[in-house]
Image: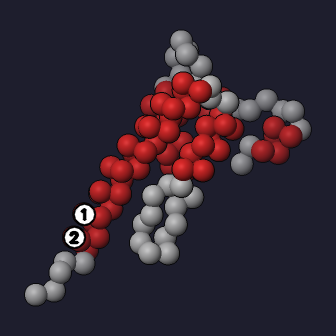
Amino acid sequence: MYEAMIERGQPLPPEARTPEPGTDRDIEEWFFRAFHDLSTCRDYSFGVGPIPWIAIDRYSERAGLDDVNHDCFVYLMREMDSAYLRWEAAEEKRRNPPKT
């Protein structure tokens, strides 16, 4: 979405920037936005699939995260994804209860 701005050398709007340590930026909001963005990379061919690792890695790279923050980001996205997939599976069972 912001690729054209980056290519033209334009500054990104505040909501598109990676949070900097020590700022009053709401980092939780940034993580939820990242998770939402990454959720668009899911495969739905056999139900709801996990976010591909390559998508998480690429997002981290584009955000400019260093190695330590990258590892934390991958861990957090995987944890959020696992929780989402558990919720989605429970919702699927609720929507389609087993026939007896």
Instruction: Name the one closer to the observer, 17 or 49.
Output: 49
Residue 91 in the image: above or below residue 99? above
Q: Is residue 29 visible?
A: no
**Tag 2 secondary structure:** helix
Residue 93 left/right relative to 77: left
Disc 2 and disc 1: Cα gap in Å?
Answer: 6 Å
- Whole-percent x and y of residue 85? 35, 57
Relative to 16, is 68 above or below? above
Q: Report helix, strand or loop for mark 1.
A: helix
Q: Answer whether residue 73 is visible to the viewer in this image.
A: yes
Q: Is residue 22 above or below residue 54?
A: above
Q: Position of residue 33 (x, y in %)?
A: 52, 42
Residue 59, x across and y down, in percent: 62, 42
Disc number for residue 10: none
Give, as a three-letter code, the residue at label 2: Arg
Q: Quadrant of the C terminus?
A: bottom left
83, 18: nearer the viewer: 83
Q: Position of residue 18 (x, y in %)?
A: 62, 29
The amino acid at mark 1 is Ala
Say which residue label 1 marks: 90
Contact between marks 2 and 1 (CB within 8 A): the answer is: yes
Give the labeled residue for mark 2. Answer: 94
Callout 2: few (<14), some (14-19), or many (20+) C-alpha neighbours within 10 Å?
Answer: few
Q: Residue at x 53, y 12 (%)?
A: 22
Q: At 59% across and 27% down in the image, what residue appears?
A: 67
- Disc 1: CA contacts within 10 A as few (<14), some (14-19) or many (>=20): few
Q: Is residue 77 left or right of residue 99?
A: right
In the picture as drawn, the residue positioned furthest to the top comes out as 22
